[in-house]
Amino acid sequence: MVNSLFTPQHLIGRKTELRQISEILIEDNDFLLVGAPGIGRRTLIRAAAQQVGAKVIEIDCLRTTSANRFLRLLADSILDVFSSATELALIEQWTQSYPLVLEQSQRPRLIWHLPSGKEWSLFQSLLALPQMMAEWMDCRVVTVFLNFPHIRSWDRTGKWEEYLQQEIRRQSRVSYALVATVIEPWAQCSDLPIISLAPLDDATMQAWIVPEMAGEGLRFDAETQALQLFLSIVQGHTGDAVNLARRIWLDRQAFMNAPIDWDRLPKVPSTPAIDGLIEAHHVHRSTLALVEDLSNTFESLILLLPASQVRVLESLALDPTDKPQAREYIQKHQLSRGGGLQGALASLAQKGLLYGPEQGYRVASPFLAFWLKQRLS
């Protein structure tokens, strides 16, 4: 129950983007969707696909560490979508021409045995399968490659990416949605439509979260400006808003269900929102607890970044600016000049940790920004 609590049952805002993507899918065309993690990229694509009646195949390239792993995720995703008896019979018939076996036990699974480095022909075949299924079943299909640029972590020569881009242009019954955090240079030089997602504005977020919390018997206290604090923390990110709302709810439930040891009560302004009234300190305390749970992840992330990028990220978390290249800002935070700074900004944006100039170089993850400020202050 908790994992589904506050999960939006409908698309929040994004009417313009929904219309754009729906029109693209109706024409069986492709697009690049750009935005930070947690901003609602996957939800938007699913909503558009549902609107036009398209089947959705999803592959998260962040989980692909090798060619074989990529093929496994692609094969499993195809079978997740084409899972009826009729569809599986067609796929089994198709496998007769390839070094594949369709195992139909509790969960159907495509099996292959190829030596390392011999996966190329299988990649070509699997990538063509959704197109064939769309033709046979007379249906629309959208194949979504989440975190698409991560394919380069193992596709060092670019051979797989280049072929994938060729298939995107060639296939007519499958729409491809490439999802990334920044606009890909090659996409800028192509005719591929690019749709960028900015954080939701506070009015849109408020119109959604207030009724959601009310549905669980919770309401924001106007006197302490609890709602304003909530909105300033999540910064228009639906995913982070869901996580913070859940944490506030869980903290309240834990307090209500636990025996009270008055001698061990934390020294906070008041108790959790037992009566359903969420005050500002409840929002702050739940945010601290949530960020504490994420601290190991954030620590590991920081350790993986070059020192120059960490410095830039910390500076922008503590002292936000839309002009980090300004001489005064560079001197104040002792940042590297010229290409070093610009390279750090570009790399952080590529990793999905920082917005580009169009969003004022903000730290893309609100909770990471909150954690950095707490860590440095």
Image (cartoon, grey):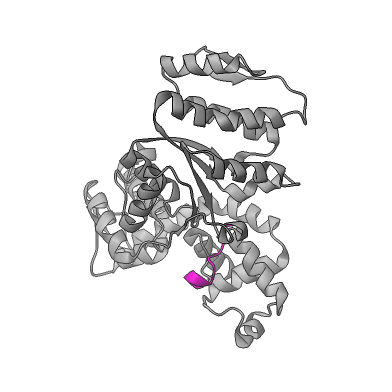
Residue occupying the point 54% across, 73% down:
318
Q: Is residue 357 magenta?
A: yes
Most extreme residue toward the bottom is: 328
In the image, residue 80 lies at what x, y percent? 47, 27
In the image, residue 373 lies at what x, y percent? 54, 68
Residue occupying the point 61% across, 40% down:
63
The range drawn in magenta is 351-360
Residue occupying the point 37% across, 43% down:
26
* Most foreground residue, 296 or 122: 122
State whether residue 271 appears in this view: no
Q: How many marks?
A: 0
Q: Quadrant of residue 347?
A: bottom right
State whether residue 350 appears in this view: yes
Indicate left or right for 29 with 100 as reference: left
Most prominent secondary structure in the magenta stretch?
loop
In the image, residue 235 lies at what x, y percent? 41, 64
For the C terminus, give its image quadrant: bottom right
Q: Is residue 300 magenta?
A: no
Position of residue 307 relative to residue 167, above or below, is below
* Most foreground residue, 176 or 153: 176
Indicate left or right for 135 with 319 as reference: left
For the N terminus, give its image quadrant: top left
Position of residue 362 relative to residue 105, above or below, is below
Position of residue 232 relative to residue 130, above or below, is below
Indicate left or right for 323 with 203 as reference: right
In the image, residue 197 lies at what x, y percent? 43, 59
